[in-house]
């Protein structure tokens, strides 16, 4: 009899559980993974870092003396109850200066305006991350769920009983706009984070979101090379040799040719191999030499510099003495023949340098690809 009763009790409990899960799945919070482990330690400070993703969800921001404490409470509740990787981030606003308004004054100059309230203002934002892009499906799904969440720490009645006021930025405006001014019943169902939206990680340089770098294929071609120009620490180097045409850019191919295991298919490949040999020969003599291979050319450079030179009063550039020395050392030697000046290129291991070495900007990987690579390697 006991076994039958136990089975019936278990069956009833399973029915209730299934019903509860089904009801939860139909609610706006249904797809949040409430069984995922997310750390929520009251003794830890979950401040936003650069590694927390390029895109995040800005849930809300807090002001005033109680703002920081309420922001931390929200972070802990989002982590503990909803298994969301939440963070805090302090933001400072300066309203003391003037700003350019729309239109012009009576003298035709842009209107200068001031904020209604001067001084500094500090806010603590609560964000959820991390997401690879603004239109990431997971980010959009979680954003929709967050807009309907009603955390206990933000409940007005609970705060009132505790003798506290909501420190949410523009809390009164938020309540009026969502509950009184809105005619959309769906918007009225949203919680205190109903106006959450996607933002970029303020800890990541703006250049990440405007990637300017070399072609990914070219980067892949040069990455394995021991003395690749991509590894030059400075902003500038001095190009001493140029080899045009298709290039051998993989170290294994170069090694195979040197060992006689592979035959060169053209003179263009020979030129690329010469660039590699020149780099090694220069390194053997103590020069800081680099090689770089593009789709149609190979370069050899020497040196690493932060600037090409310093500006002069006449608007010209006083060239960096070290750069000038390299240009003179490896530039062609002028000779007089028949009343004309000829230039005989210098060489190393019978491979000629350019007639006129020139400073060049060191090519850089795109910041976004470097960020993604570092992020993946840390996982």
Image: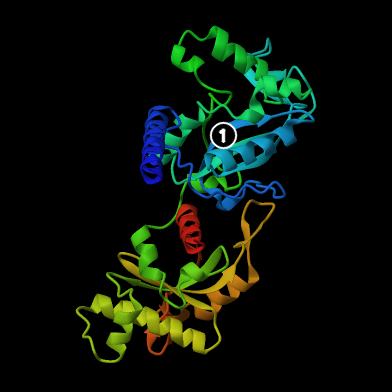
Q: Residue at x 49, y 44 (%)?
A: 209
Residue 300 in the image: x percent, y percent? 44, 74
Is disc 1 surrounded by few (<14), some (14 to 19) or many (20+) residues within 10 Å?
Answer: many
Work out whether 329 lies above or below 309: below
Residue at 61% across, 47% down: 203
Disc 1 on helix, strand or loop? strand
Residue 63 visible in the picture: yes
Residue matched to label 1:
58
Q: Pinpoint residue 159: horizontal percent, then vertical percent.
A: 72, 24
Horizontal arrangement in the rendering, residue 30 relative to residue 114 (left or right): left
The front one of 226 and 1 is: 1
- The image position of residue 30, as x and y in percent, is 42, 33
Q: Picture coordinates of residue 89 (x, y %)?
A: 66, 41
For residue 246, what is the image quadrant? bottom left
The answer to whether one can see residue 357 in this image is no
- Whether residue 256 is situated above or below residue 317 in the rendered picture: below
């Amino acid at each position: 009899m006991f076994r039958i009763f136990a089975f019936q009790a278990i069956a009833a409990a399973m029915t209730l559980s299934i019903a509860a899960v089904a009801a939860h799945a139909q609610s706006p919070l249904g797809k949040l993974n409430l069984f995922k482990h997310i750390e929520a330690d009251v003794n830890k400070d979950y401040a936003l870092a650069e590694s927390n993703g390029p895109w995040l969800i800005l849930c809300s921001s807090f002001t005033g003396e109680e703002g920081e404490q309420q922001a931390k409470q929200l972070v802990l509740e989002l982590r503990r109850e909803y298994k969301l990787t939440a963070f805090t981030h302090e933001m400072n606003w300066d309203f003391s200066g003037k700003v350019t308004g729309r239109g012009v004054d009576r003298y035709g100059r842009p209107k200068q305006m001031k904020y209604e309230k001067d001084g500094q203002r500090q806010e603590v934002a609560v964000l959820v991350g991390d997401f690879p892009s603004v239109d990431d499906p997971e980010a959009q799904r979680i954003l929709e769920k967050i807009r309907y969440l009603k955390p206990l720490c933000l409940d007005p009645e609970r705060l009132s009983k505790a003798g506290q006021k909501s420190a949410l930025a523009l809390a009164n405006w938020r309540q009026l706009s969502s509950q009184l001014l809105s005619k959309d019943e769906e918007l009225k169902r949203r919680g205190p984070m109903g106006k959450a939206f996607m933002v970029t990680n303020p800890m990541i340089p703006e250049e990440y979101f405007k990637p300017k770098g070399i072609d990914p294929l070219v980067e892949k071609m040069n990455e394995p090379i021991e003395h690749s120009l991509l590894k030059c620490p400075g902003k500038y180097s001095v190009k001493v040799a140029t080899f045009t045409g298709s290039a051998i850019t993989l170290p294994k191919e170069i090694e195979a040719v040197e060992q006689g295991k592979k035959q060169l298919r053209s003179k263009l490949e020979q030129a690329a191999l010469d660039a590699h040999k020149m780099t090694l020969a220069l390194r053997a003599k103590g020069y800081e030499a680099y090689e770089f291979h593009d789709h149609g050319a190979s370069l050899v450079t020497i040196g690493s510099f932060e600037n090409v030179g310093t500006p002069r009063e006449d608007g010209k550039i006083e060239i960096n003495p070290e750069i000038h020395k390299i240009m003179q050392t490896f530039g062609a030697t002028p000779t007089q023949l028949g009343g004309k000046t000829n230039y005989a290129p210098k060489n190393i291991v019978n491979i000629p340098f350019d007639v006129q070495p020139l400073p060049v900007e060191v090519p850089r990987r795109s910041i976004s690809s470097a960020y993604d690579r570092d992020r993946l390697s840390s996982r």
